[in-house]
Amino acid sequence: MSATAVPMRLALVGNPNSGKTALFNQLTGSRQKVANYAGVTVERKEGRLVAPSGRQYAVLDLPGAYSLHPASLDEAIARDVCRGFYPGEPAPDALVCVIDATNLRLHLRFVLEVREIGKPMIVALNMADAARRRGIQIDVDALQRELGVPVIETVAVRRGGATALVEALDRFDIATAPPRKRLAAHDHDGDVEMEALHAETRRLLSLAVTMPRRTARIDDALDRWLLHPVFGLMALAVVMFLIFQAVYAWATPMMDAIEAVTGWLGAQVGSALPEGPLNSLLVDGIIAGVGGVIVFLPQILILFAFILALEESGYLPRAAFLLDRMMAAAGLSGRSFIPLLSSFACAIPGIMATRSIQDPRDRLATILVAPLMTCSARLPVYALLIGAFIPQQQVWGVFNLQGLVLFALYMAGILSALVVSWVMKKWRRDKSEHPLLLELPSYRLPHPRDLLIGLYERAMIFLKRVGGIILALTVLLWFLLSFPAAPADAVGPAIDYSFAGRIGHAMTAIFAPIGFNWQICIALIPGMAAREVAVSSLATVYALSAADDEAAAQALSPLIADGWSLATALSLLVWFIYAPQCISTLATIRRETNSWKHVAISAGYLFALAYLASLVTYQVAVALGAG
């Protein structure tokens, strides 16, 4: 094939935890995150590979699948694309089946299923180095001879670990790929009898694989503690607690530096431009608004770093297994843990990750409670209010009080999600239980390159939101706050006469019982587009409503600390635990459920919970003297 010919279409297919996505990154240079649990590659991923010979390939990274007899949406997509039946997706010219060399007992059966499709195929024997370290001996030539397809060793997490596969692809000729024998007679659906698959897997293992142990000693030793019903839960609680302590302790120096740069930039721009609308737009609107959100980037990245490390280490599937009994009591399954944990970053990927949940009932319940997980967009609001109203002091000489409050807010969201799912369980007709079947991958040290790529991706996503929707909404809010100008005989602040001021004052009739002033009411409106916009909105409101330039130059945190009561701050914190999610999340629920009814249910019950919880919090705080 010449360099200018139509690229060959390759589809990477394999079990979750096989390293398929890491291999995709090696082949294409894609900067998609690497994860080791089911559901992360549900979305279609495609990249380009140009081999040293100049031969070009279009490489598809298919969803992870345990079988081509689909039990979930991601497995159905993988099967249909491999067979060339997926609507709007060209059939692949060849398949690359990626398998874990340390777990051939499970992965070889999947190879046999893929081989039955009848397409030209290469087997990538991934994690070959880890298999050798465990003393697993694999006769690659025998395996290749018995399967009737090329078998190539790869190490997806090592630089150059896919070189042999690229060379094999260059030598691979689809036209001369030999036909492969069928394994057994087919039933009326065209599926191979499962017993024949297991028998052939056992035969291949006996011929080509010598395995001293089915599992690694280190895995067994760690699992004795980390999967223990008591010590395992204690370890999980400690891990989550330390994460939220680190979010505050480690991020403070970087946040101080960003605040200093933002303040300096605002002062420089303000002094360089004459007084007028342009000066106000740049200093009070863009710099104050966007800078008020960027300052929380260090905290968000620290939270992401821990989540990525737990994903890469192989610990998250074990946490799902450990929590299955508890979650089943609340009407969920252990598989719900991974989408719900993803929702700590953002509810959108968390909701999309529910496609890996086989039971439609459990999937819908997980979708509806996912917004209760404290997504990263809430973190700027929490950090602002905690920094303004909670003193920076040590508790028992060890713990940071601000970190303890943040941990409590996250736990409130988690417990609320369990209560809501338990209520839904009581209402539904089908009360049967569905057992959890989940592969536990080997433990591994997170690869620094993959962690850095993941953090870079999330930083870019966050900054693009700042540069896109947040910037646009900040400018729009500045316009609403600045126009129309106050009349000549005005006696109050000019902002009271603006469009936003009038809207905010009108909304206080609804939100006054929960302690919200008109500035907070204004911030709630753009916060529906993206929650973190609430911080930039407050920064813009207070910058434009300040009595003098000196007050306008102050940070937002001391401004609200002086102007709000503790009861109002607590009420707003509780509001954001339950606040109706952003419009993007509502759109994702609509797309995943194909139902406006479920969108209305989600938005309605979240608003009701937010208002009721804030009302109780504010009224109790006022009664205790915090108002």
Image (cartoon, helix red, strand yellow):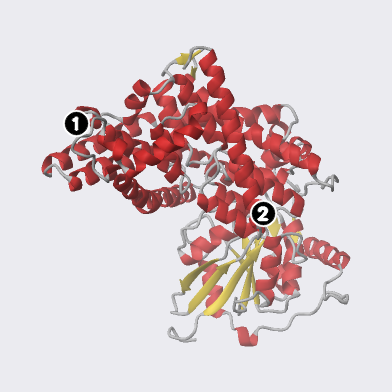
Q: Residues within 10 Å of mark 2 (few under 14, many from 20)?
A: few
Q: Nearer the viewer, residue 245 or 126?
A: 245
Placement of 354 over or under 540, stated as above or below: below
- Whether residue 235 sits left or right of residue 209 in the image: it is left
Mark 2: secondary structure: helix
- Give how far across and how far down residue 46 sits, in percent: 52, 68
**Label 1 is placed on what type of residue?**
Asp
Placement of 586 over or under 405, stated as above or below: below
Residue at 70 percent of width and 50 percent of height: 364
Residue at 18 percent of width and 44 percent of height: 279
**Label 2 is placed on what type of residue?**
Lys
Q: Nearer the viewer, residue 568 or 312?
A: 568
> Where is mark 1, residue-wise?
549
Between discs 2 and 1, the one toward the N terminus: 1
Q: Which mark is residue 283?
A: none
Toward which corner of the image does residue 501 lie, by quadrant?
Answer: top left
**Direction front: furthest residue:** 489
Q: Which mark is residue 597?
A: 2
